[in-house]
Amino acid sequence: MGSSHQALFEVAEEYCGLIESAQADDDDWLASLTRLLPRLHALVAALDPISSLPAPGLDADLDSRFELYSHLHQTLGERDSYWMEYDSPRSSPPATGSLADDLTDIYYDLKLGLERLNAEADPWCTLRDWQAGFSIHWGQHLVDAERHLYSLSARNLLA
């Protein structure tokens, strides 16, 4: 395991800790998240290809996912929703995104890998799964979350 892999594991732990500690009356967690997401993005994007094996299926605990999403949605309040940036035909209605949804999807993918690591599973499996999941699913959530948090920060709306 290289130092960049260890750094990724540490950032994943930090990310999950921030999400688990999100409170409506503590806006510092959102500012911390704004600084952390680019580090997570850089570390995952810099992984060397590990394998072409598919990523595991999504965690089936939909109740837990919805509970976390609901908590984050309530915590974020008016800062949760955002307009998607894309080109579409004039007849298509504008699309919206949810920061709570983005953060929840990233959280569950990272948390599953961290749980495997804590069970002393092979770290290469976790890296492979994170890389595949990033590539086919939560990477878009990460980019959307970074974009929205940047917009909130630029408008002094993080706190």
Image: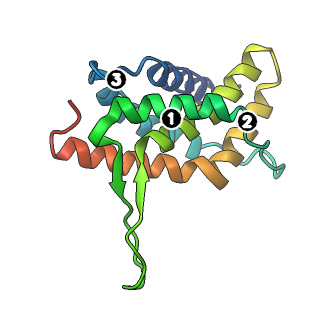
Do the CB atoms of the residues marked 3 and 2 lie less than 8 Å apart? no
Give the residue number, with chain letter if any, for mark 1: 69
Q: Secondary structure at mark 1?
A: helix
Residue at the (36%, 85%) spot, across then down: 90
Which is nearer the eye, 22 or 37? 22
Kind of residue indicated by mark 3? Trp
Percent across and percent down for residue 66 are 57, 35
Q: Nearer the viewer, mark 1 or mark 3?
A: 1
Kind of residue indicated by mark 1? Tyr
Give the residue number, with chain letter if any, for mark 3: 29
Q: Nearer the viewer, mark 1 or mark 2?
A: 1
Percent across and percent down for residue 143 are 45, 51
Q: Is residue 144 visible?
A: yes
Judged left or right of residue 67, residue 143 is left
On residue 42, which mark appears?
Answer: none
Name which of mark 1 and mark 3 comes first in the sequence: 3
On residue 59, which mark appears?
Answer: 2
Residue at the (42%, 40%) spot, across then down: 38
Name which of mark 3 and mark 2 comes first in the sequence: 3
Judged left or right of residue 10, residue 51 is right
Percent across and percent down for residue 60 are 75, 36
